[in-house]
Image: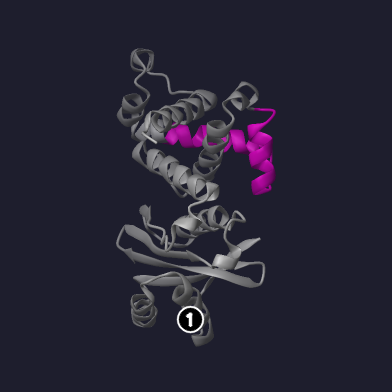
Amino acid sequence: MINLREVTTKEMVLKCLEVSTEQTPQTTENAAIFALAWIERDKIRPLCIYYNDTMIGFVILHCEGDLCEAQQFVIDRNHQGKGYELEASRAIMNYVENNLKSKQFFFFPTLPTKTIVTESKKDVDLELEITKVLQEIGIPAHIKGYSYLRCAITKAYHEFELLSKITKTIYPEIAKEYETTPARVERAIRHAIEIAWSLERNAIVKFFGTPTTVINKQKPGNAAFIATIADRLRLQHRDKPA
C-alpha cells in the first residue's frame, strides 16, 4: 500500500537525496529545497513516498495561495515499472485535496531518464488530463464524487464497453477500491455533476457541445457525462501524431 509521510528528520532527507543523487541532475537544487522547506513549511512541503514501510521515492510540493505544484517527483529505479508511479500520483493528488487549501494543482513529474517512461507513466498522464477537464468544467476537488469520476472516466477510457453496464461494473469496482458501496458511488458522482451544472453550466455545455442540452436545460446523467469525457480523450489521443 502506497502512503505518504511528511519529511520530519534529517535521516529522511538523506534517504530522499540518495534517490535524487542516483537519478536526477538536480541533486544540489533538491538539497537546497529540502533545507528551505524547514524555514518555509507553509510553502514547501517535502513528502517521502513509501510502499508499506519501505521508502521508494519522494515528492516536493510547492504551495502558495490557491496554487500547488508537484515539481519534484522521483521513484527509486529499483521500484520502477511496478505501477508505483501511478499509485503514488494518486496518493499525492488525494493528499493535496484532503490536506491543503489549494484550489488548483499542477503535476510536473521529474523524469531523469527515458527508461522510466513506461505504460504506467502514460496512465499518470491520462489521469492528469482527466483532472484538468474536471477542474475546467467546475467539479469541486474536495468532494468524493470528484475522485470517483476521475476513476470512472479512466476505466471507461480503457474499456469503453463498460459503460453499457455501469451499475454492474464501474460502480462496484470503484466502491471496492474506496471501501464504500456502489449506491454511494453513484450518488456521489451524480451530486458532483449537479454541483458543476449549477455553478459552471456554460462550461459543461461548451465541452459537451450538445445542442439538446442547451435547449432542454437538462444536466447530463452519470453515464453520459463519463462517456463524453472518456470518448473525447480517446479521440484526441488517436489523432495525436506518433
User: Residue 140, position in %: x, y?
Assistant: 42, 44
Residue at position x 45%, y 77% in the image: 21
Numbered range of the magenta stretch: 167-195
User: Residue 65, position in %: x, y?
Assistant: 29, 62
Q: Is residue 92 left or right of residue 239?
A: right
Residue 21 lies, with reference to residue 80, above or below; the image says below
Mark 1 nearby-residue class (10 Å; few <14, some 14–19, many ≥20): some
Residue 87 lies, with reference to residue 27, above or below; the image says above
Q: Does any portion of residue 45 appear in the rendered image?
A: yes
Q: Is residue 197 left or right of residue 19?
A: left
Residue at position x 38%, y 80% in the image: 31
> Residue 241's image quarter?
top left
Q: Which amino acid type is marked by label 1?
A: Val
Q: Which residue is mark 1?
A: 13
Residue 86 lies, with reference to residue 162, above or below; the image says below
**Residue 172 on the magenta segment:** yes
Quadrant the C terminus occupies: top left
Residue at position x 46%, y 23% in the image: 220
Q: How many marks?
A: 1
Q: Is residue 52 left or right of residue 47?
A: right
User: Residue 205, position in %: x, y?
Assistant: 34, 24
Depth check, front residue: 203 or 23 = 23
**Residue 193 on the magenta segment:** yes
Residue 12 lies, with reference to residue 201, above or below; the image says below
Main secondary structure along the magenta-highlighted residues:
helix
Quadrant the N terminus occupies: bottom right
- Give the SS element for disc 1: helix
**Farthest bottom residue in view:** 10
Q: How is the image coloured?
A: one colour
User: Residue 35, position in %: x, y?
Assistant: 37, 83
